[in-house]
Image (spheres, helix red, strand yellow):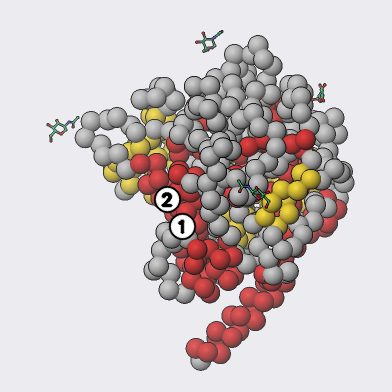
Amino acid sequence: MKHNPVELPSGSRSYALPRTSKIVLVIIFVTLAILTIIPVLYPLLGYPIYLLKFSPSSSSSSKPSTPSTYENDEEVGAASIKISDQAEGCDIFSGEWVRNLEAPYYTNTTCWAIHEHQNCMKYGRPDTEFMKWKWKPDGCELPVFNPAQFLEILRGKSLAFVGDSVGRNQMQSLICLLSRVEYPIDVSYTPDERFKRWKYTSYNSTIAYFWTPHLIKSKERDANGPTQTGLFNLYLDEFDEEWTTQIEGFDYLIISGGHWFYRPAVFYENHQIVGCHFCQLENVTDLTKFYGYRKAFRTAFKAINSLENFKGITILRTFAPSHFENGIWNQGGNCVRTKPFRSNETALDGDNLELYMIQMEEFRAAEREGRKKGKKYRLLDTTQASLLRPDGHPSRYGHWPHENVTLYNDCVHWCLPGPIDTWNDFLLQMLKMEGIRSHQERLHSGDRKMKFQ
Ligand SMILES: *[C@@H]1O[C@H](CO)[C@@H](O)[C@H](O)[C@H]1NC(C)=O
Ligand SMILES: *[C@@H]1O[C@H](CO)[C@@H](O)[C@H](O)[C@H]1NC(C)=O
Ligand SMILES: *[C@@H]1O[C@H](CO)[C@@H](O)[C@H](O)[C@H]1NC(C)=O
Ligand SMILES: *[C@@H]1O[C@H](CO)[C@@H](O)[C@H](O)[C@H]1NC(C)=O
Ligand SMILES: *[C@@H]1O[C@H](CO)[C@@H](O)[C@H](O)[C@H]1NC(C)=O
């Protein structure tokens, strides 16, 4: 089965030639979305910031803006976060990148699933070091991806990616990592490239992708808007039924979002305008992108918690910062580093920190609510590992040099192979821990029952 070479809807380039006007629109939306990642700037190496420690397992105590209202935070956190505590007493999401000369485990000739604009070697990226690292958690090892093991765990099960083009980027990494064992066949229920479904026939496993850049119902209001990057209506309290009506049968849901919320938007709640983010409309209060981001996650999680027949595990894949330096995306900003940062050379700050915190807060609240209904939530905390990889983006190697593209230097998506493959190392480790964890949760809930009786 050949991967459709047509630019996927979340593709980031204006030169992509879509097949239908619907896809045209979507491509434009995404192009613009990416273009609006404006104020994300990273300190140069000469300007080190102290590492902000934000290891998920100690998050409730170390994060200043975690709401103190979660009086039973310890209990909530225990089930959701401490994956590795139960295994090896370490937090797999906190660590350093170390050399791995055996990587990469696939190339653009062994894997057809690499998206055109993340096929960095094809477009002449000269350095290859960026592929030769693996994540070393503080205090334990994270095994490199074992495709046979992953497929065995996923046997008879299904996994859906819900989000934007960075979510698709992870799915394509996963398909490539699994390709040493098997390629999936395309069993999509629609020709619409925004919604893909892949089947691993020998394992009866399904991997799906649902395009939903804002996670909630949204509509373009003005193709230009105040920044020429589109102005969107975000219906902050309404589900995006394109995915919420489709996920009930899935065993695992990997939900993510972020970069689209930088764009101008008008916020609706209860069918009325309540404010906006940089909409420049008269008499409409600017509530900032953070307001929209928080409400979008709240509504997305609410949708999941309201699905009676959804028995799967919801995994929040946390925000992955972009790495524009020496300018913003459209003013010469680029990502030209060829080595990872060490953890003491940079820190999560500014918008990235705020977006991360908002996600965590909404995640915790949703988990607490979901627990009453038997819903399970887990955290795939890619933020720190990704923050340390300014070298992993396509930069100008996502297209030919002469191509007239709007986002010439892509410091948002990730080259394949590349650091995003590690997100799937994390994912496999999490799936492996599920058996142990669900056993422990059963014991735990038994304890509580006894206490309350
Ligand atoms: C793969 O990358 C090489 C450069 O390493 C390039 O010459 C080739 O065209 C690429 N092939 C595909 C199928 O992308
Ligand atoms: C394949 O998996 C689905 C669940 O995803 C299950 O309903 C079905 O019975 C399985 N089919 C076979 C042949 O095992
Ligand atoms: C904005 O508010 C002012 C003062 O209440 C009012 O005069 C004006 O008509 C409003 N503009 C719009 C576009 O509603
Ligand atoms: C970061 O840590 C490494 C190894 O511990 C050390 O060699 C380096 O000097 C540190 N860098 C900074 C900027 O503190
Ligand atoms: C690139 O494309 C944009 C929009 O399509 C156009 O306005 C611009 O003139 C083009 N630039 C070049 C150098 O072709």
Q: Which residue is at a point 42% across and 50% down the rendered structure image?
A: 294
SS at badge 2: helix
Q: Which residue is at a point 73% across and 69% down the rendered structure image?
A: 88
Other-residue count near label 1 (Cα within 10 Å), few / some / many at <14 / 14–19 / ≥20: many
- The residue lying toward the viewer, choosing from 221 and 102, is 102
Other-residue count near label 2 (Cα within 10 Å), few / some / many at <14 / 14–19 / ≥20: some
In this rendering, the answer to whether 300 lies above or below 274 is below
- The residue lying toward the viewer, choosing from 16 and 325, is 325
Q: Which residue is at a point 60% across and 45% down the rendered structure image?
A: 345
Residue under label 2, please give it: 294
Cβ at disc 2 under 8 Å from ligand 3: no
- The residue lying toward the viewer, choosing from 275 and 154, is 275
Of labels 1 and 2, earlier in sequence is 2
How many angstroms separate mark 1 from mark 2 (CA)? 7 Å
Question: Percent x, y for residue 248?
Answer: 60, 56
Under mark 1, the amino acid is: Glu
SS at badge 1: helix
In this rendering, the answer to whether 46 lies above or below 302 is above
Question: Percent x, y for residue 340?
Answer: 68, 41
Q: Is there CB contact under 8 Å for labels 1 and 2?
A: yes
**Quadrant of residue 125 in the image?**
top right
Cβ at disc 1 under 8 Å from ligand 2: no
In this rendering, the answer to whether 188 lies above or below 400 is below
Q: Visible in this render: residue 184?
A: no
Q: Which residue is at a point 69% across and 60% down the rendered structure image?
A: 138
Residue under label 1, please give it: 362
Image side of residue 272 versus residue 25, left or right: left
